Amino acid sequence: MNDVLAPPAHHPDLPQVPLKPLGKVLAVTSGKGGVGKTFVSANLAAALAKRGHKVLVLDADLGLANLDVVLNLYPKITLHDVFTGKAKLEDAILPAPGG
């Protein structure tokens, strides 16, 4: 698990460009539906927010996304709208209860 959270390795042939730290990315995934990905994602996000972290949760299940239901949100812009160029990603972000 530590190697997942480690900074990227440096390659000697590539120029080293200092990057501003953007945060951590954590993916909750499974090839099977109904195993609790949304439940784990929503609760992990809530726990991190409660500890003072800025959190963004993205439900990338284009067919059966239901994070909005779990968080009691009513999005007007979907990820499909973003992918098809009808909206910008930043316009699809909604504040959730609890931060």
Image: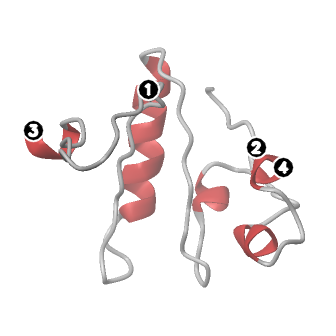
Residue 77 falls left or right of residue 52: right
Query: What's the residue at 18%, 36% (across, down)?
Result: 6
Residue 33 image-quadrant placement: bottom left
How far apart marks 3 and 2 lie (CA) works out to: 31 Å
Picture coordinates of residue 57, whole percent (x, y):
54, 48
Image height of 31 relative to 97, above or below:
below
For mark 1, what is the residue?
21
Task: Name the mark on residue 2.
Answer: 3
Query: What's the residue at 33%, 67% (across, down)?
Result: 29
- Amino acid type at circle 4 is Asp
For mark 4, what is the residue?
91
Q: Nearer the viewer's eye, disc 4 or disc 1?
A: 1
Residue 53 falls left or right of residue 27: right
How far apart marks 1 and 2 lie (CA) works out to: 23 Å
Q: Earlier in the sequence, mark 3 or mark 1?
A: 3
Q: How was the colour assigned to the protein in this rendering? A: secondary structure
Q: Nearer the viewer's eye, disc 3 or disc 1?
A: 1
For mark 2, what is the residue?
94
